[in-house]
Image (cartoon, rainbow, N blue to C red):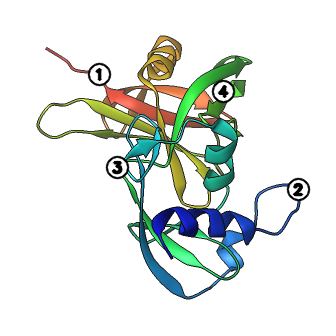
């Protein structure tokens, strides 16, 4: 079967139900890799061409699973490997309610999934050791993260407060009673 047939075949194998499919319970045989890639900006590519139909991207995003460092599209009968440049999702919007420790941060990703940052959906920031550029993430589901878009990260920075952690001052944000450090405060 060619690559286009393989992608279409994946979609016909999905059971129709509300909510996300239980990909964590499906253990089909691995059928190889397909030429599908999720770029760092959240664009999905198939055979080197962007997938322009958002409903198609949303459907594929509902069957993505991460095992170790590898990403797969999984149905009850087939598992195929795909390439993910950074994270499979991008957090593109932020809604803030409340203030201080009672604040709640709700993120919306590029396929319209929403999560509230908190114990089940923590935030983390990875700093590039060479450039010192931050890459912020929020856990969307299972072990699948969304890279927080730069504009959304700027919103977080505007909400940031300082807090002492292990003899260091940190800038961070509160959500659902949890403090998430987003950057260390430099002292001259």
The answer to which of 109 and 174 lies nearer the viewer is 109
The residue positioned 56% from the left and 26% from the top of the image is: 92
Asked if the residues shown at circle 3 and circle 2 are in contact, with their CB atoms under 8 angstroms apart, the answer is no
Disc number placed over residue 185 in the picture, else none? 1
Give how far across and how far down residue 29 sits, in percent.
55, 88
Can residue 60 be seen by looking at this rendering? yes
> Which residue was labeled with disc 2?
18
Question: Mark 4 and mark 3: span between their CA atoms?
Answer: 34 Å
The residue positioned 41% from the left and 34% from the top of the image is: 41
Name the N-terminal-most of marks 4 and 2.
Answer: 2
Can residue 116 be seen by looking at this rendering? no
The answer to which of 188 and 66 lies nearer the viewer is 66
Q: Secondary structure at mark 2?
A: loop
> Which residue was labeled with disc 4?
101
> Which residue was labeled with disc 3?
85
Name the N-terminal-most of marks 2 and 1.
Answer: 2
Question: Mark 1 and mark 4: span between their CA atoms?
Answer: 20 Å
Which quarter of the rendered picture does the C terminus lie within?
top left
The residue positioned 61% from the left and 86% from the top of the image is: 28
Name the N-terminal-most of marks 1 and 3.
Answer: 3
Name the N-terminal-most of marks 3 and 2.
Answer: 2
Q: Is residue 11 above or below residue 109?
A: below
Number of other residues with Cα within 10 Å of mark 1, as a class: few under 14, some 14 to 19, many 20 or more: some
Q: Quadrant of residue 24?
A: bottom right
């Amino acid at each position: 079967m060619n690559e286009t047939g393989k992608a279409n075949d994946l979609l016909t194998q999905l059971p129709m139900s509300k909510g996300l499919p239980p990909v964590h319970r499906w253990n089909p045989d691995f059928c190889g890799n397909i030429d599908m890639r999720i770029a760092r900006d959240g664009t999905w590519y198939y055979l080197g061409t962007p997938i322009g139909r958002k409903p198609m991207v949303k459907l594929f995003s509902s069957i993505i699973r991460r095992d170790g460092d590898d990403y797969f599209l999984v149905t009850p009968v087939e598992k195929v490997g795909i390439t993910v440049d950074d994270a499979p999702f991008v957090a593109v919007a932020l809604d803030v309610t409340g203030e201080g420790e009672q604040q709640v941060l709700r993120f919306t990703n590029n396929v319209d999934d929403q999560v509230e940052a908190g114990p089940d959906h923590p935030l983390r920031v990875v700093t590039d050791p060479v450039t010192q550029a931050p890459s912020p993430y929020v856990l969307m589901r299972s072990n699948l993260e969304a890279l927080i878009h730069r504009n959304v990260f700027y919103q977080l920075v505007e909400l940031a407060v300082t807090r002492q952690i292990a003899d260091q001052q940190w800038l961070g944000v509160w959500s659902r009673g949890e403090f998430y450090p987003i950057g260390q405060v430099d002292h001259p």
